[in-house]
Image: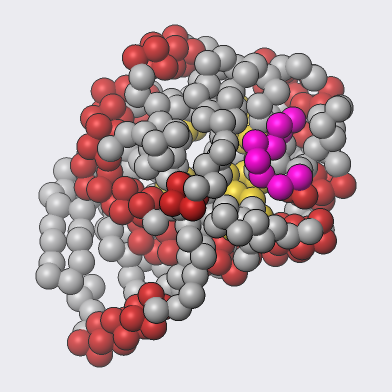
């Protein structure tokens, strides 16, 4: 839909106001606050940990429509107009037509990879089967380890293990294909923070080619695949646009994203912007109340509790969010505030905050 002149002028005026506002940096690399361990997963039991990004986001124009138009057909040809980019990609049943705005409300409008939205991002392997069972309470949850390795204890507990192709290193790709033979069709997570040098560190075009070479075949076998998950640094959104332009015929079921910051309203605006811009249901595969601006403006325990409660309420109520993973189900918090911890570091059982997370703070 072509926007009228009035709408364009209003949007431009709003953008000028927003860009002139005082916002905290979103790129920890730029602040010198990058003293985190890079997470290159070498085994199922030892996925390394790493730094986080700040996630300040400007408010979005509520009148804007999606820049990208998706259809369920792979035979249509990309089109363009003078006011926005348009392109077509083959997608699975997660999206049956074009989507332009976020739809609020309880329930799932799209096929969700798990019965329960609140997922578990885990880095302790299979070391405590009893603890894994406690995290499976309330229904089948998504579970991942930043690797492609199966986790039999998690599967036995009723968790839906999502393999990840973490990066495009030859050894990671070989490991991924070997491990994929052990999975029934589920959801695959793609490259971890490719816009970050300390993570998978891939340009959008290399990522698109690796997707075509290594991931697309699984979509044809019935797997759903989430997009690469960019950090919330300023480079992330443009990286995703370039990737999607380079991967027009890729079968992408969900848009994955990461976010770190301390304001719930900023997080909500960021997710809304991704939904509106890319027009696919969203998986928030990492997020936490963490300030990486270099000013160490962390929330206390009560502030983190309120942040998570507010954001979980939003995520549960937004039918275009199919899964979310609070960063905190880890023995080593990798520089993220201890107030974000969701488990007991000794037993791996849910702590008070983790129990509230499992129950959606209800």
Using the image, determine if residue 22 lies above or below residue 263: below
Give the residues in magenta: 330-338
Q: Residue 71 colored magenta?
A: no
Q: Which residue lies furthest to the front in this view?
A: 32
> Residue 268: horizontal and vertical position, in percent?
56, 64
Q: Is the magenta stretch mostly helix, strand or loop?
A: loop
Using the image, determine if residue 217 lies above or below residue 307: above
Using the image, determine if residue 325 lies above or below residue 306: above
Q: Which residue is drawn at 65% across and 56% down?
A: 296
> Residue 353: horizontal and vertical position, in percent?
82, 49
Q: In this view, does 215 lie to the left or right of 33?
A: left
Q: In this view, does 36 lie to the left or right of 336?
A: left
Q: Residue at x 55, y 66 (%)?
A: 266
In front: 103, or 41? 41
In front: 329, or 316? 329
Instruction: Name the quadrant of the C terminus.
Output: bottom right
In front: 260, or 317? 260
Q: Residue 335 colored magenta?
A: yes
In front: 291, or 244? 291
The answer to whether residue 230 is seen in the rendering is yes
> Residue 324: horizontal and vertical position, in percent?
60, 47
């Amino acid at each position: 839909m072509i926007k009228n002149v009035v709408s364009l002028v209003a949007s431009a005026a709003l953008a000028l106001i927003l860009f002139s506002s005082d916002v905290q940096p979103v790129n920890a690399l730029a602040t010198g606050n990058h003293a985190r361990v890079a997470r290159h997963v070498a085994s199922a039991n030892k996925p390394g940990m790493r730094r986080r990004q700040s996630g300040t986001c400007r408010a979005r124009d509520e009148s804007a429509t999606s820049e990208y138009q998706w259809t369920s057909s792979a035979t249509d040809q990309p089109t363009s107009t003078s006011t926005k980019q348009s392109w077509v990609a083959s997608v699975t049943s997660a999206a049956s037509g074009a989507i332009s705005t976020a739809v609020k409300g309880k329930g799932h409008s799209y096929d969700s990879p798990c019965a329960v939205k609140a997922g578990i991002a885990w880095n302790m392997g299979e070391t405590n089967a009893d603890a894994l069972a406690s995290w499976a309470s309330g229904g089948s949850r998504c579970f991942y380890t930043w690797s492609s390795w199966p986790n039999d204890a998690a599967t036995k507990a009723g968790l839906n293990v999502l393999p990840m192709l973490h990066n495009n290193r030859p050894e990671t790709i070989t490991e991924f294909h070997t491990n994929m033979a052990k999975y029934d069709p589920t959801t695959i997570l793609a490259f971890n923070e490719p816009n970050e040098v300390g993570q998978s560190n891939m340009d959008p075009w290399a990522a698109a080619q690796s997707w075509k070479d290594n991931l697309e075949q699984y979509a044809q076998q019935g797997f759903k695949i989430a997009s690469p998950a960019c950090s919330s640094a300023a480079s992330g959104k443009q990286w995703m646009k370039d990737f999607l332009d380079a991967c027009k015929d890729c079968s992408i079921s969900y848009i994955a994203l990461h976010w770190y910051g301390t304001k719930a309203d900023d997080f909500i605006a960021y997710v809304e912007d991704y939904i509106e811009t890319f027009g696919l249901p969203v998986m928030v595969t990492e997020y936490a109340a963490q300030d990486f601006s270099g000013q160490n403006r962390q929330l206390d325990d009560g502030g983190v509790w309120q942040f998570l409660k507010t954001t979980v309420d939003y995520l549960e109520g937004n039918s275009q969010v199919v899964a979310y993973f609070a960063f905190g189900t880890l023995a080593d918090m990798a520089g993220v505030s201890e107030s974000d911890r969701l488990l007991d570091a000794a037993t791996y059982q849910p702590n008070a905050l983790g129990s509230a997370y499992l129950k959606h703070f209800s």
